[in-house]
Amino acid sequence: MDGSQESTSHVAAATPAGEGNGWGPLSGLPGNPMMWILIASELLVFGAALIGFAGARALDPVGFAESQSLLNRPLGAINTAVLLTSGLFAALAVQARREEKSSLSRIHLAIAALFGFGFMVVKFVEYGEKFAAGIDVDTNTFFTLYYLVTGFHLAHVVFGIIILALVGIWNSEENLETGTAFWHMVDLVWVLIFPVIYLMR
Amino acid sequence: MRVFGISSGSMKALVVAWALLMLLTIATAFAGKVGADVHLGPVWLGSLAVVTVLKARMILTEYLGLYRAPGWRSGFTLTLVVLVGAMFTLAALTPV
């Protein structure tokens, strides 16, 4: 390796992922900038869906209040804590990897995924309660939106767990930053869904 | 960026951020009156909206690492304020 190549590789190792790779203002973001484009898109999609939910509620406040009272609010609150705790372990995994502690990083990722499974179990308990009471996606507008928004989010949880597994195997720092960024986006979206669908009345 | 005097980007800062997020989740449950089937007035709706934005900003800053990109953090926070503001304004304007 000549001097200029050595100098270039040192710069690459010392700068955040994406920096100096032609991403312009996106270069300063942690992880792969493409993930941040996805995060912004998802935030806007779920944000629009929740504004739509608030609009639909304005057209039928009595029907929405009656349906919302059938939701299990404590389970929703518990699931918020479960997902945020999962997010902590995902963030700890990245920090451990930065400190060259790969085994600890993988353990943290596994715990993050376990909490993700915990979220899914609580969600299935909640859906089970609704189905047992004869409430499904066709019951009324409130439950159509409830199942669509929470179901779409749940699909992201499943996909997020798969991503956590993948970056646990191929665990470069950039992969971990990018994969866990998706997982934190799932946290972020749930933090918006819970108060709007379960509590706003 | 510092969380209670601890610099962002350390394991300790992440644990402190998680503890704050748990407190904010309890605040969400309190403001949203999880245990009661009552209508929330504008004050409680406003409180719920503020706590929601604070939680989201904490996730962006500490979990997603935007303490390293304060300009982007401001942009995402502004987006959240607009989105959450629209949701809760619609709720506050909805007749009981």
Image (tube, rainbow, N blue to C red):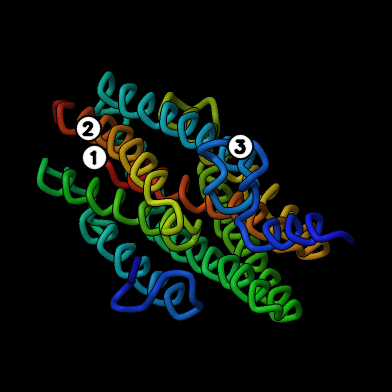
Q: Amino acid at mark 3?
A: Trp
Q: Amino acid at mark 2?
A: Ala
The mark found on residue A23 in the picture is 3
Chain identifier of the residue bearing label 2 in the image: B
**Callout 1: helix, strand or loop?**
loop
Q: Tell us which disc is closer to us: 3 or 1.
A: 3
Taking the spot 68% from the left edge, 69% from the top edge, the residue there is A109
User: Which type of secondary structure does the marked residue at label 2 adopt?
Assistant: helix
Nearer to us of marks 2 and 1 is: 2
Alpha carbon separation for disc pair 2 and 3:
39 Å
Q: Is residue B11 left or right of residue A18?
A: left
Query: In the rendered image, is residue A4 in sight?
Result: yes
Q: Residues within 10 Å of mark 3 (few under 14, many from 20)?
A: some
The answer to which quarter of the image holds residue B12 is: bottom left
Residue under label 1: A201
**Dot 2 crowding, Cα within 10 Å, few <14, some 14–19, many 20+:** many
Question: Which residue is under mark 2?
Answer: B91
Labels 2, 3: front one: 3
In which quadrant will I find the C terminus of chain B?
top left
Residue at the right extreme, as displayed = A1
Q: Are marks 2 and 1 on the same chain?
A: no
Most distant residue in the top direction: A59
Q: Nearer the viewer, residue A190 or A181?
A: A181
The kind of residue tagged 1 is: Arg
Cα separation, mark 3 vs mark 1, equals: 43 Å
